[in-house]
Image (tube, grey):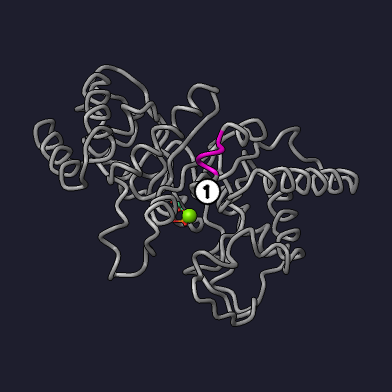
């Protein structure tokens, strides 16, 4: 068993017919990053920086943040770390941003939208990310994009901060890939305009599903509606992945469905090759990948995209997984 585990860790994910995939890790801190290396994830596809803010009594300083980001980068030797800019609000509240009660927190003042009231919070974080870029390979990623205008503004801001640190004498990498999350349906539908501006896209299927279905992902009364296998979600994903593939822009999916063996079939069939998941899922997803051919995946994608109900999709995918394993 030990040898099998080591072999699984050391082999890059590959399908039964030899198509190479990339399995990346979602991490909150350096301990997760170390376990990502242990299971053979090739990079960090999503570093959720909220953890440092949620576990701190006040706003972490630029130096404290730089250290935390550096720790994750150094725990992922030679691997790219995609650092996601702060995604607070919604389900993740911190006391120092004031206790704001909103009727619809997920539809409200969350994530990069907080920038209007807390510009210094974000500028400090971006400076800390830029400083940490000296210790390895990083990409920067902005969450909760709902309009092209936001991408234009964020790009300008990031470039302004990068230039000012270089003017202060910091040796920064020549290029830091700039990307966004596609997790609001409006961004998914305007993906071509967004692709003109970014180096990569990461699909946040958790939020994309809740926003498409108009169902709060944390409300148990409507949780049954928040399923990425629902045909409407799959059809939106197909368009999104297809647009990125056509434009040859790297596209990763970093929501929970990236670690679901059932979802691997249709996502592969739609052209996705990069999956970012909790480190614990990497091993079993590699085993699953080995059993699938691209022809199986394309057939599964075609089938589920034409289905009418969630039950039909789930029954079909569960049956296919049983047959393959
Ligand atoms: C997502 O929305 O799918 C995602 C990965 O981001 P989070 O779960 O942190 O909102
Ligand atoms: Mg999200």
Query: Quadrant of the rendered structure where residue 196 is?
Result: top right
Tell me: is circle 1 under 8 Å from ligand 1. no
**Is 316 a magenta residue?**
no
Q: Which quadrant of the picture is home to ligand 1? A: bottom left
Left or right, 318 with reference to 52: left
Magenta region, main secondary structure: helix
- Where does the image place residue 150, in percent across and percent down from the top left? 68, 49
- Where does the image place residue 6, in percent across and percent down from the top left? 28, 37
Q: Residues within 10 Å of mark 1 (few under 14, many from 20)?
A: many
Query: Quadrant of the rendered structure where residue 78 is?
Result: top right
Q: Nearer the viewer, residue 181 or 293?
A: 181
Left or right, 18 with reference to 166: left
Left or right, 7 with reference to 244: left
Q: Residue at x 14, y 41 (%)?
A: 318
Q: Residue at x 16, y 47 (%)?
A: 311
Q: Residue at x 47, y 43 (%)?
A: 203
- Where does the image place residue 143, in percent across and percent down from the top left? 57, 52
Q: Nearer the viewer, residue 9 or 310?
A: 310
Left or right, 123 with reference to 95: right
Query: Which residue, given by chain and number where applicable, does mark 1 sit on?
Result: 75
- Which quarter of the rendered picture does the C terminus lie within? top left
Q: Nearer the viewer, residue 215 or 151?
A: 215
**Is 189 a magenta residue?**
yes
Q: Nearer the viewer, residue 166 or 111?
A: 111
Element type where label 1 sits in the image: loop
Q: Which residues are magenta?
A: 187-191
- Where does the image place residue 141, in percent across and percent down from the top left? 60, 46
- Which quarter of the rendered picture does the N terminus lie within? top left
């Amino acid at each position: 068993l030990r040898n099998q585990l080591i072999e699984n860790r050391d082999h890059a994910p590959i399908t039964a017919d030899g198509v190479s995939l990339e399995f990346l890790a979602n991490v909150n801190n350096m301990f997760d990053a170390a376990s990502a290396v242990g299971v053979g994830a090739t990079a960090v596809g999503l570093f959720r920086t909220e953890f440092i803010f949620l576990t701190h009594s006040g706003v972490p300083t630029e130096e404290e943040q730089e250290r935390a980001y550096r720790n994750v980068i150094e725990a992922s030797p030679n691997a790219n770390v995609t650092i996601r800019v702060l995604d607070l609000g919604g389900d993740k509240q911190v006391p120092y941003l004031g206790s704001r009660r909103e009727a619809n927190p997920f539809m409200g003042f969350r994530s990069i939208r907080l920038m209007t009231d807390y510009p210094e919070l974000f500028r400090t974080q971006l400076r800390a990310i830029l400083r940490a870029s000296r210790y390895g390979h990083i990409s920067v990623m902005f969450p909760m994009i709902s309009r092209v205008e936001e991408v234009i503004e964020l790009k300008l801001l990031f470039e302004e901060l990068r230039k000012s640190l270089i003017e202060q004498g910091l040796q920064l990498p020549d290029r830091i890939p700039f990307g966004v999350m596609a997790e609001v349906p409006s961004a998914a539908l305007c993906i071509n305009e967004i692709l003109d501006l970014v180096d990569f896209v990461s699909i946040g299927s958790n939020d994309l599903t809740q926003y498409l279905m108009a169902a709060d992902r944390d409300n148990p009364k409507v949780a049954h509606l928040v399923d990425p296998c629902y045909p409407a979600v799959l059809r939106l994903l197909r368009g999104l992945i297809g647009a990125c593939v056509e434009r040859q822009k790297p596209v990763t999916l970093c929501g929970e469905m990236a670690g679901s063996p059932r979802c691997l079939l249709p996502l592969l069939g739609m052209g996705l090759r990069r999956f970012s998941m909790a480190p614990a899922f990497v091993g079993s997803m590699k085993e699953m990948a080995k059993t699938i051919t691209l022809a199986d995946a394309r057939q599964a994608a075609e089938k589920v995209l034409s289905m009418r109900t969630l039950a039909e999709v789930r029954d079909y995918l569960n049956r296919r997984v049983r047959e393959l394993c």
